[in-house]
Amino acid sequence: MNALRGIKWPYAVIALVAVAAAAIGLLRPQLIPAASSTSAKKKPGATALIKQNPPPALFTDAQIATIGKQASAERTKADALFAHWKAAHGSTRDDKAFAAWAAQQVPAPPTAKQRTAELHQVQTLAKTRTAAGQKAATWLELYGKKDIWKLYLHDQRELIPAAQGTAEKAELKAALKLAKTISDQLAAKDKQPAPFVLDPTLRPDKHIKPGAKGPYSYPSRHAARSAAAVTFLSALSPHRAEDYEWMRAEVLYSRLYMAGHVPSDLTAGTLLGDLIGDYELTINGH
């Protein structure tokens, strides 16, 4: 099933993978110098980045099912909460007030006992890691914050007027930025160490120093950005919502798989991201 899910990527991704394969096989000697000189002048966009590093085989539907269902459940909560904000503020943009309000809607971190139980889940999952799984998780961690979602929107923009596409690109960018800002502020306030900080054996590559407290992981930045993007993109293109939700589950599962987060980090981040997605849609009249 996992291999088949790859074809549900937007057609732009499929085309990019094909172009990348041709480039590697035929034009590598000519492209390498050009890429080097270009990158020094301008940072590659999401399309170029993923073209250069297409996705490997990702996780199976069975692997991501649980975290996918947990993330989906947060949407109902977020919509109910956002209705209160909308009733009081309408469609007026006020990022500062919204950020303060949204942060208050995120549940308090779990108790120490609950977090320990979640850590045990991550430790158990870590014992099942494979080389292929780590490759998938690494790719999802790298591109799951922003680039995947920007590429999905790029695919949508191929079918709409240019001015509308430009506006929606700016709106998605604003949602992703707000998700990072609020999740970073909450993480700094709540100070919940990431699983690999609590148990450095989970990620020896991180080289955690004895006594380290951070990085902090509640709520998850990946989850907040992914949820904001999925809420936003799904409203613009409802018939693709299932694919967006699938990719969100892939990203979230990768964070468990490589001990970046425990489940409550991800559900809290998802709730926050859903609120941000609702906000961005509302203030832009979608």
Image (cartoon, rainbow, N blue to C red):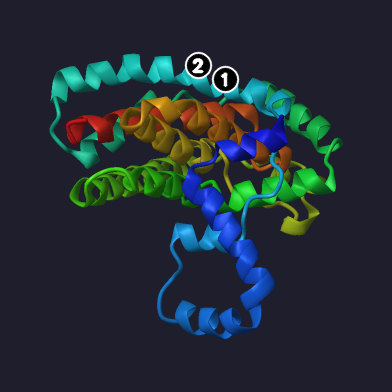
Which label belongs to residue 73?
2
Q: Pointer 1 and pointer 2: residues touching (CB < 8 Å)?
A: yes
* Rendered location of residue 92, percent (x, y): 13, 33
Q: Which residue position holds label 1?
A: 70
Residue 167 located left or right of residue 116: left
The residue tagged with tag 2: helix, strand or loop? helix
Which is nearer the eye, 41 or 3? 3
* Rendered location of residue 251, percent (x, y): 59, 39
The residue at the point 18 percent across, 50 percent down is: 163
The residue tagged with tag 1: helix, strand or loop? helix
The residue at the point 34 percent across, 48 percent down is: 158
User: How many numbered circles are shown?
Assistant: 2
The residue at the point 23 percent across, 41 percent down is: 96
Residue 219 visible within the image: yes
Q: Give the quadrant of residue 149.
A: top left
| 172 to 123, vertically: above or below | below
